Image: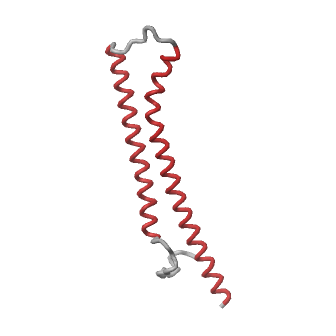
Amino acid sequence: MNRSNENRTGFLGTYFDPDAALRIARLAGILAWVLLAVYVYTTLVSIGQFWFLVAAGAVSYEGTNIFDRLSIPTLQLSQLSPGLVYFVTLKVAQQALLILLDVEDNSRRAARQRIDVQE
């Protein structure tokens, strides 16, 4: 059964507005990309500042062991990890909301078809 063939009735048994839920899902997806872009931008600025200081001679590796030298890039890349967590969390929430809306719609459609068959 195609959605365009089906009449949309204002069924009052739902506890939510499907259009509002779709807007929330869309907003979560947009917010995920915006937050990821902000975190990527700040990470790139931080890496750029670090390499500018290295080129200017303001950062010296004298007296540091290999582990300290290896930890410097990871400190800058670790700024990106909260952004990745926020991105994944918001995208999972968006997809979960869309899946739940689809399950609710399919359940309602199946119940309607079962009632129509019994009549």
The foreground one among 1 and 44 is 44
The foreground one among 71 and 43 is 71
Q: Position of residue 63 (x, y in %)?
A: 45, 8
Q: Is residue 96 above or below residue 52?
A: below
Q: Position of residue 97 (x, y in %)?
A: 52, 61
Q: Position of residue 43 (x, y in %)?
A: 40, 33
Q: Residue at x 51, y 75 (%)?
A: 14
The N terminus, quarter of image: bottom right
Q: Is residue 49 above or below residue 1?
A: above
The C terminus, quarter of image: bottom right
**Is 37 on the left-hand or right-hand side of 7?**
left
Q: Residue at x 52, y 14 (%)?
A: 66
In this picture the colour scheme is secondary structure
**Is 117 on the left-hand or right-hand side of 95?**
right
Q: Position of residue 56 (x, y in %)?
A: 31, 15
Judged from this view, the residue extending furthest toward the bottom is: 119
Quarter of the figure with residue 105: bottom right
The number of numbered badges drawn on the structure is 0
Q: Residue at x 44, y 55 (%)?
A: 28
Q: Residue at x 42, y 67 (%)?
A: 20
Judged from this view, the residue extending furthest toward the right is: 118
Judged from this view, the residue extending furthest toward the top is: 63
The foreground one among 48 and 96 is 96
